[in-house]
Amino acid sequence: MNKVALKIDGMMCGMCEAHINDTIRKVYPKAKKVESSRRKNETTFLLDSEPDEEKLKAAIAETGYEFKGIKTEPFVKKGFFKR
């Protein structure tokens, strides 16, 4: 499992965040924990595979927002009951 963080410019309100979240879910229907923050200019989600940067960049550009970068790192589940 990978944690993906996207830097996105142009989100101004909660509806913008929801619009980006919907876009991520359309590109990757199996994405989990999709969250956006207009204050941080960031969207994060979990994905079983490596994300396709060009595919994400194109989808976000279609929505009118500006894709600024991507960071992917292995996701390690935290908590008392690790498996």
Image (spheres, helix red, strand yellow):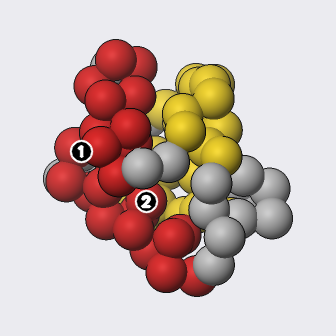
What's the amino acid at mark 1?
Tyr
Q: Is residue 22 left or right of residue 26?
A: right
Residue pictured at 80% horizontal, 56% vertical:
40
Residue 15 is situated, as x and y percent measured from the top left of the image, at: 49, 80
In this view, 22 is above or below 30 = below
Question: Is residue 56 in sight in this rendering?
Answer: no
Secondary structure beneath dot 2 equals helix
Residue 47 is situated, as x and y percent measured from the top left of the image, at: 38, 40
Q: Is residue 67 left or right of residue 64?
A: right
Question: Is residue 11 in sight in this rendering?
Answer: yes
Q: CA distance from mark 1 to mark 2?
A: 12 Å
In this view, 2 is above or below 50 = below
Front-lying residue, 71 or 76: 71
The single residue placed furthest to the right in the displayed view is 39
The N terminus appears in which quarter of the rendering?
Answer: top left
Residue 81 is situated, as x and y percent measured from the top left of the image, at: 62, 61
What's the amino acid at mark 2?
Ile
The single residue placed furthest to the bottom in the displayed view is 14
Kindly identify which residue carries mark 2.
Answer: 20
Dividing the picture into quarters, in which one does residue 19 lie? Answer: bottom left
CB under 8 Å between callouts 1 and 2? no
Residue pictured at 34% horizontal, 17% vertical:
54
The single residue placed furthest to the front in the displayed view is 64
Residue pictured at 66% horizontal, 38% vertical:
7
Q: Earlier in the sequence, mark 1 or mark 2?
A: 2
Secondary structure beneath dot 1 equals loop
Q: Determine which of the numbered discs, if any, sits on residue 28 in the image.
A: 1
Residue 38 is situated, as x and y percent measured from the top left of the image, at: 70, 65
Front-lying residue, 74 or 9: 9
Residue pictured at 30% horizontal, 43% vertical:
62
